[in-house]
Image (spheres, grey):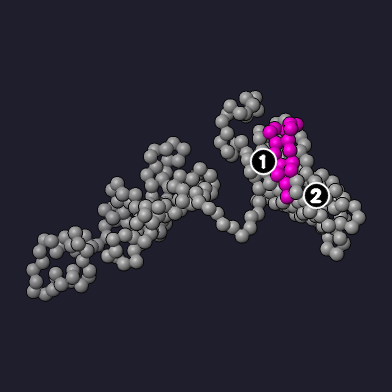
Amino acid sequence: MAMKDRKTLKNYFLKGKQPLEANFENLIDSSVNKIDDGFSKTEDEGLMLSNIGESEKIISFYEDIKDDFAQWAINLNKSDNKPEDPRGALNFMVPETGNTVLSLTHKNRVGINQTDPAYDLHVNRLIASGGRVGTFCEDSEIPADGKWYRIIQNLNYCQAFEIVARTGIRETGKHSLLHAIAVSAYGRSNSRIRNTGARYSFWRPCRIQLRWTGDTFNYHLEMRCRQDLGPGTKIKYYVTQLWSDEDMGIPAQFRDSDNS
């Protein structure tokens, strides 16, 4: 059915005219039907939309309603009866090219140019960033008093982290900056910490240090400043997780059967 504007529809029913069956069809089809059109609005749910028939499309955005292609479209993908995610993903796409730009799933995952994200944020193109901050640790400060403090604890299996830390006191000539990669295949193993550090100090070196401690199946990463910088002085640090057997979906064959 060709779309009819209000003026055309009104002309069908002017005084003295006898509307045809097709005119009534045009009028009815120009109105919203909650069941057929998958459209409704309630106080509790707000605006409710559903796809029609076999189509996955929910909304299309046009610059002009007469254009052949929409500028943008939102699709609600079929779930394919996947037991791990029984509900479909919400996809924002460009209809003319068929490319999906953004995908949101019920497993709390976001895909950029990735329709089936395997991680919390799955980007399938280049990433440009003016900076990066690790947020693995909720607490990101420890005293710079020369004592060891656990910054990551109760670890098991294989783990890898990136750590950036900084400490110092203004106008004292004591400053230290650390960038490190810490990897461990279980505790009490041949674990490694690779440091790249910079420091400014007139007398004793002001240095930030890391070490692995703990048992085979419960180990920890600790940090300290080599010297006591006095009350109130802190080490500020940020941690990024690079690898975790549990989160990366590592096969069970790599885990210890008695401690998995």
- Give me the residue at 87% from left, 62% from top: 172
Crowd rating for badge 1 (residues with CA inside 10 Å; few <14, some 14–19, many 20+): some
Seen from this angle, which residue lies furthest bottom? 15
Horizontal side, residue 101 vs residue 182: left or right: left
Q: Quadrant of residue 189?
A: top right
Residue 61, position as x, y percentages in the image: 36, 62
Residue 210, position as x, y percentages in the image: 78, 44
Residue 129, position as x, y percentages in the image: 59, 58
Decide: is 260 above or below 85: above
Horizontal side, residue 33 vs residue 133: left or right: left
Crowd rating for badge 2 (residues with CA inside 10 Å; few <14, some 14–19, many 20+): many
User: Type of residue at label 1?
Assistant: Ala
Would you say residue 237 sits in the magenta stretch?
no
Q: Which residue is mark 2?
A: 208
User: Type of residue at label 2?
Assistant: Ile
Q: Quadrant of residue 177?
A: bottom right
Horizontal side, residue 206 vs residue 218: left or right: right
- Give me the residue at 46% from left, 53% from top: 102
**C-alpha distance separating marks 2 and 1:** 19 Å
Closest to the observer, 168 or 219: 168
Q: How many marks?
A: 2
Residues in magenta?
179-194
Would you say residue 187 sits in the magenta stretch?
yes
Q: Which residue is mark 1?
A: 160
Closest to the observer, 36 or 93: 93
